[in-house]
Amino acid sequence: MRTNLLRTAAATTLAFLLTGCAGGASSTGSTGSTGSTGSTGGAGGAVRPEPVTGAGSKITPVAGSKIATVRGSRITVYGTKGGAARRTITSPNDYGAARVFLVERDEGEWLRVLLPIRPNGSKGWIRAADVTLAKTAHRVEIDRGAFRFTVYDGDRVVRTGKVATGEAGTPTPPGRYFFTELVRPADRNGAYGAYAFGLSGFSPVLKSFAGGPGQLAIHGTNKPSAIGTRASHGCVRVSNDDITWMAKNLAIGTPVVVQG
C-alpha cells in the first residue's frame, strides 16, 4: 500500500547519518550509523538528501504489523502500562524524520513498541492516543551466513538478493529492527549508493562513530564487488538496484530481521 510514512532528513544531520556506512577498513562516518566502512567513494559530509516517497511494511510470521507514527513533537515511553514514565522521545528524530515505532502488542489504549535506542531490542509502552497507526504486510530478512536478503509481502517473497555485512571486528548484530529514516545521497555513485535506510539498531562494538551514535543502516554501494562478503562496520550493503526497489516499495517502520 502507498503511504506517506517516508520522510526526508535534514541535510546537516544526515551528513552524520551516512558518513559511517560505506567503505573499507579505513573510514570515518556514521549512518547515524556504524555502517559499512566510512569514507570510500567520497561520501560523508558531502552527502545531501533529496525528498523521497515510498510504501508498505511488516515482521516475522504474522499476518501484518503495525507502525506507530508520533502525532506531536514528543512522546512519553512507560516501563509498564499506566506505570511510571521511563523516558521522553522527541519527533522528528535527530535526522529530521517523523518518529515511528514498530508495534509488538496492541492492547487498545496502550501499545508495546520496539524502541530505536540502546541496548538493541529495548521495548516500552506508549499511549495509542499519542500516535497514528498504519498496517503493513512487508518485512525484510537478512541472512548473515548466506549473505542474502529477502523481502516478504505476507508469506510471499517479492524480492531477494545478496548483501555485504559487518567485518569480524565490527559485526552486523542479529535481532529485530525497523527502518527509522530514508535518505537519497546527491551522488548515487558515492559510497552509500542510491539510497540509505537508517535502522533502529546499533553496533555492539562502536558506541560512537565519526560524530554519530553507531547506528546501523541498509544502503547501496559504489563497490558491488564487495557484496557477498564481510566488508562493513556493521551496516548492510545491497546493490543500487535493490536499495532503489526498497526505497520505492518499503516505508519507514518496515520490520527488519537479522539472523544467521
Image: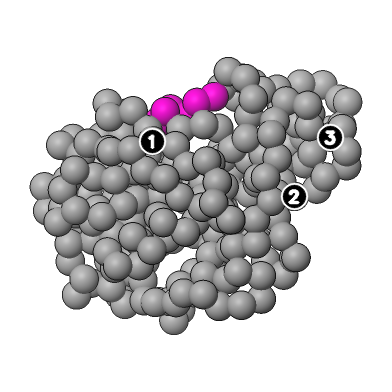
Q: Name the residue under label 2.
A: 104
Q: Earlier in the sequence, mark 2 or mark 3?
A: 2
Rendering coords of residue 114 (x, y %): 66, 44
Q: In this view, does 196 lie above or below 15?
A: below
Q: Which of 223 and 49 is in front in this view?
A: 49
Magenta range = 91-96
Res 125 → quadrant: top right
Res 108 → quadrant: top right
Q: Which mark is residue 110?
A: 3
Q: Which of marks 1 and 3 is nearer the N terminus?
A: 1
Q: What element carries label 2?
A: strand
Secondary structure character of the magenta stretch overall? loop
Q: Is residue 80 magenta?
A: no
Q: Which of marks 1 and 3 is in front?
A: 1
Res 119 → quadrant: top right
Question: What kind of residue is marked 3?
Answer: Trp
Q: Residue at x 28, y 73 (%)?
A: 227
Q: Is mark 1 on a helix, strand or loop?
A: loop
Q: Nearer the viewer, mark 2 or mark 1?
A: 1
Question: What kind of residue is marked 1?
Answer: Thr
Give the Cα distance between marks 2 and 3: 11 Å
Q: Nearer the viewer, residue 10 or 215?
A: 10
Quadrant including the N terminus = bottom right
Residue 68 visible: yes
